[in-house]
Image (cartoon, rainbow, N blue to C red):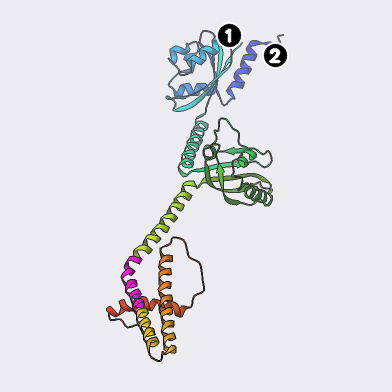
Amino acid sequence: MSDPARDPRKREQDGKAIRDRMADRSYALDRDWRYTEFNTQAEEQLRALGKDPAAMIGKVLWDEFPNPPNEKLLREAMRERRPATHQHYYEPLREWVENRIYPADDGGITIFQRYVTEPKRLEEQLSRTAAYLAHAEALSHTGSWVWNPTTGELFWSAEHFRIFGLDPESVKPTYDLALAGIHPDDRPLLEDTFAKAVAERRPYGFDCRVVRPDGEIRRIRSLARPVLSASGELTEYVGTIIDMTERVRADEALSRSRQELAHVTRVMSLGALTASIGHDLSQFVVAIETNGSACLRWLSREQPNLEEAVAALRRIMRDAGLVADVIGNIRAFLQKTAGPKTALNLAHVIREARLLVEAEAARHHVVVEE
C-alpha cells in the first residue's frame, strides 16, 4: 500500500484544496509559460474577463494576455528562479493588483494575486493630504513638530526645517538642535516654559527668535499641546511654529509710519496756527513796549513813582515769561520725541489757550466767557 503522504497526486490535491481556500487568486504556469492550474478565486476572475478557465489549461500566457504590464518581472522571475513582487493598475478590471511571483518545483512559476485598490487609494489620499499640508505650511509659514517624551524622538515638517534654515537631508532634529537654533537671550524662557508644560502636561505658547546658520534672525511663535493616553500618560507633544518675521516687520513699519504721520500732522497743524500765534506774540510785544514806556514815564517824573514803575516792570516780566512759554511749547510740538512730563495748573493752561484763540474768536464774533 502506498504512503498517502508520498503520493504526488494526493499532495497536488491537498495543495489545490489549500489554494482554493485562499483569498488570493492563484495561477500556476510551467516552464513553457503554459497554464497548469487555477484556484477557485482565479477562475472567478477569468470568467469576469470573459475567459473559460477549463479551456485555458495548457494555453500559453502570452497568447491569452499579450503585453502584460509585469512581463519583464515575470520573465526575470522565471529565468533567475527568484521571488518577485509587482503592483500595477489593471484597466480591464479597474483594480490595482499585487502579484507575488514564486518559482515552482516543476521549473515553472506560481503567481498569487490580490486586489490592493483600497490600500492604494488610501496611500494616494495620504500622499495628497501630505502634499496639501506641505503647501499650506509653506503658504502660511507654519511648521509642525512632534516630540516623543519617552524616546526623545523629534519630527519636524519641511517648513519647520526651512524656518530654522536647515536641510532636512543633512540633519536629524533633536531637542538640543532645536535649542541651539534659539537666540541665546530667549533660550532660558524656552527651556523653562517647555519644562513646566511637560511636567504639568498642559499646552503652552511663547514668542522667541530663531538664529539661522547664516546669522539671519527670524521671529517665531511656538504653540503646542500634549497628547495623553487613555490612562492619562503623556505620549507626545504636538506643536507648531509660526514664522512671524514679516508680520513683525510690517507692524514695526506701520508703527514708524504712524509716528511719521503724527509728526507731519503736528507740523501741518502748526502751519494753521502760525498766523494766530504770530498775532498773539505781537500782542505780548506791544504789551511789553507799553509797560516799558509807562515804566520810563513813572521814573522820569520830578518825583519818580517807584511803586508804579515796579508794577510796570513786573508786567513786562510776566509778558516776557508768556512769550518764552509759547516759544518753548512750539519747540516741543515740533519734536518727534515726547517732552518731559510736569505738573500743570489747568487754570494757567486755559488762560494760555484763551490767549491763543481770543483774537481768532473775536474775528468770528465768538465771545469767550470765564
> In the rendered image, is residue 155 in sight?
yes
- Lower sequence index among marks 2 and 1: 2
The segment highlighted magenta reads 270-286
Q: Mark 2 points at which residue?
A: 5
In the image, taking residue 65 as reference, residue 278 lies left or right, namely left
* Vertical placement of residue 54 versus 285, above or below: above
Few, some or many residues within 10 Å of mark 2 (<14, 14–19, 20+): few
Q: What residue type is labelled 1?
A: Gly
How far apart are the two marked residues, 2 and 1, measured between alpha carbons? 22 Å
Residue 29: tell me if it is visible: no
Q: Which residue is tagged 1?
A: 107
The answer to whether residue 284 is magenta is yes
Q: In which quarter of the image is residue 296?
A: bottom left
| Label 2 with label 1: CB-CB less than 8 Å | no
Question: Residue 161: x percent and y percent?
Answer: 54, 37
Task: Determine crowd level at label 1: few under 14, some 14-19, many 20+ residues with C-alpha closer than 10 A.
Answer: few
